[in-house]
């Protein structure tokens, strides 16, 4: 069996956080190996969530906006320019019990890892929980969204709907009233799960209407969302809701299955960082994390990129302290 190749830095994931980390690590002559995931994977696809976004208008430096996939292609090209080694491979297993750390791609059952690294940067991201309805993925970015901050501007004077009853859903609905003429909040139960202060915001916002005991059963539209079908869970009665925008706010799930038992996680599954004084440090020295896998507050491309910069600098300084 071939001896695993040894690297100074392996970066797992290739969204804004991972590729920014790659740019900084490459410029520090660390020749990072970036394992960007596989196109067939929904949890760690190359480029992350921006590959599912159409217009990105809130990333600094692009006053006219830029398509999500194009932005990620530019991130990738910049990392390659400075010498990052990017491979379209999905990580199946890691071993952080002893350095140099082991990283497997392909089969996780073989004893020897595919690669070893003196340091690892985890940037596997998070995925929005979806409704699982036909047409939902097809219309994502074309009327269906999971980010009001990213896409709310495009729905000025539109009637839109938000699905969810927690704090995130209320935050999305409240934010969207800055643009939409009306926001319908679709809640499965007869009460909100959101905190009292968030419930008060809904109650005092004339633009928000709540559909209690309701679920979305159908998303209609070929190239753009045309309307949705809502069902009352008590009576089974269905109604058509004229909404040109549908924001799904039922939660996020960090891509940390790979890391359970290896790194400390919060109760909600997100990685815990800040152990050793650096913003990106995990409980294992030499293993760092950045982006949405450790951020359940901001979840923006620009904050992910900033944390990728931090992780690369933290890794560079740690390696210098260890190896000179």
Image: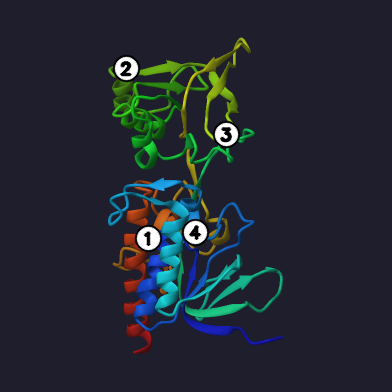
- What residue does disc 2 label? 203
* Mark before the other along the chain sequence, 3 or 2: 3
Where's residue 145, x and y in %?
47, 38
Label 2, secondary structure: give it: helix
Q: Which percent across, then down, holds residue 208?
A: 36, 19
Which comes sooner in the sequence, label 2 or label 1?
Answer: 2
Residue 273 is marked as 1
Q: Position of residue 116 (x, y in %)?
A: 55, 80
Q: Quadrant of the C terminus?
A: bottom left
Compared to residue 112, the image places residue 69 above or below, namely above
Q: Quadrant of residue 26?
A: bottom left
Q: Which residue is mark 3?
A: 131
Badge 3 or badge 4: first in the primary sequence: 4
Closer to us: 191 or 298: 298
Labels 4 and 1 touching (C-beta < 8 A): no
- Nearer to us of marks 4 and 1 is 4
State the image quarter where residue 17 is shown. bottom left
- The label on residue 47 is 4
102 vs 195: above or below: below
Task: Give the distance between the C-alpha atoms of the residues marked 4 and 2, in whole angstroms.
Answer: 39 Å
Q: Could you classify mark 2 by the number of other residues whose Cα lies within 10 Å: few (under 14), some (14-19), or many (20 or more)?
A: few
């Amino acid at each position: 069996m071939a001896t695993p190749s040894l690297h100074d830095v392996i970066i797992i994931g290739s969204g804004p956080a991972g590729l920014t980390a790659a740019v900084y690590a490459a410029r520090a002559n660390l020749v990072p190996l970036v394992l960007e995931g596989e196109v067939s994977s929904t949890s760690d696809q190359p480029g992350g969530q921006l590959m599912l976004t159409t217009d990105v208008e809130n990333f600094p430096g692009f006053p006219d906006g830029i398509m999500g996939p194009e932005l990620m292609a530019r991130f990738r090209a910049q990392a390659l320019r400075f010498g990052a080694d990017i491979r379209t491979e999905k990580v199946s297993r890691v071993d952080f019990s002893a350095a140099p750390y082991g990283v497997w791609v392909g089969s996780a059952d073989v004893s020897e890892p595919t690669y070893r690294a003196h340091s690892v940067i985890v940037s596997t991201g998070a995925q929005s929980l979806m409704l699982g309805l036909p047409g939902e993925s097809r219309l994502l970015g074309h009327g269906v969204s999971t980010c009001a901050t990213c896409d709310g501007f495009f729905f000025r004077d539109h009637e839109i709907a938000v699905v969810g009853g927690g704090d995130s859903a209320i935050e999305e609905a409240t934010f969207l009233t800055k643009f939409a003429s009306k926001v319908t909040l679709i809640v499965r139960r007869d009460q909100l799960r959101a905190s009292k202060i968030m419930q008060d915001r809904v109650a005092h916002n004339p633009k928000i209407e709540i559909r209690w005991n309701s679920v979305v059963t159908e998303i209609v539209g070929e190239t753009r969302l045309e309307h949705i079908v809502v069902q009352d869970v008590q009576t089974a009665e269905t109604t058509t809701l004229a909404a040109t925008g549908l924001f799904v706010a039922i939660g996020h799930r960090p891509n940390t299955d790979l890391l359970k038992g290896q790194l400390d996680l919060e109760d909600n599954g997100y990685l815990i960082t800040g152990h050793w004084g650096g913003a990106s440090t995990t409980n294992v020295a030499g293993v760092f994390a950045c982006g949405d896998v450790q951020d359940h507050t901001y979840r923006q491309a620009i904050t992910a990129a900033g944390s990728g910069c931090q992780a690369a600098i933290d890794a560079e300084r740690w390696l210098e302290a260890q190896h000179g």
